Amino acid sequence: MQLSKTEEELMNIIWKQKKAFMKDLLDAYPEPKPATTTIATLLKRMTDKQFIAYKSIGRAREYYPLVKKKDYFSKHVNGLIKNFFNDSAGQFASFFTQETNLSKEELEDLKKVIDEQLKKK
């Protein structure tokens, strides 16, 4: 299952805070802040999708993630490679390095990451 753009934005806040009450979530948004009802709706949908859960403390709810950020984005990157690059990591890497205007330093850093992974295999 996938999150909408607005759900993803809220999920990023929850991942960053690890645990948060409604007030904490609202405070994390820049101005203009969304309505409390909007956040409540997003939290309900994300709970239904089993991305988050909550613990009731009195009348308040403390929300926390059920899905790790790394796992969520790993699934999406793999889906992107499969659906848009014919399941070819090489095609994805070629597109990524050519279309993102990476500096020479960034490309060298990327090369180091790849070299480190090659040593581990």
Image (cartoon, rainbow, N blue to C red):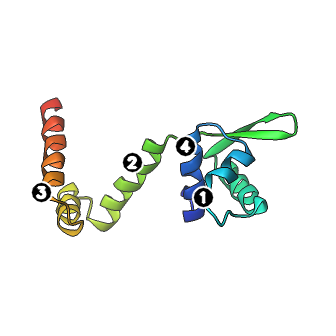
Q: Position of residue 26 (x, y in %)?
A: 69, 53
Q: Amino acid at mark 2?
A: Ser
Q: Are marks 4 and 3 in contact (CB under 8 Å)?
A: no
Q: Position of residue 110 (x, y in %)?
A: 18, 48
Q: Amino acid at mark 4?
A: Trp
Q: Residue at horizontal 54%, vertical 58%?
A: 2
Q: In this rendering, which labeled residue sits more in front, label 3 or label 1?
A: 3
Mark-to-mark CA distance, 2 and 1 = 17 Å
Residue at the disc numbered 4: 15
Q: Secondary structure at mark 2?
A: helix
- In the rendered structure, find residue 7 and report the number of the disc placed on it: 1
Q: In this rendering, which labeled residue sits more in front, label 2 or label 3?
A: 3
Q: Secondary structure at mark 3?
A: helix
> Which of disc 3 and disc 2 is earlier in sequence?
2
Q: Position of residue 114 (x, y in %)?
A: 16, 43
Front residue of 5/36: it is: 36
Residue at the disc numbered 3: 104
Q: Residue at horizontal 56%, vertical 57%?
A: 9
> Which of disc 1 and disc 3 is earlier in sequence?
1
Residue extending furthest toward the right? 59
Residue at the disc numbered 2: 74
Q: Quadrant of residue 93?
A: bottom left
> Which of disc 2 and disc 4 is earlier in sequence?
4
Label 1 environment density (alpha carbons within 10 Å; few <14, some 14–19, many ≥20): some
> Which of disc 1 and disc 2 is earlier in sequence?
1
Asked if residue 19 is positioned above or below residue 40 in the image, the reply reads: above
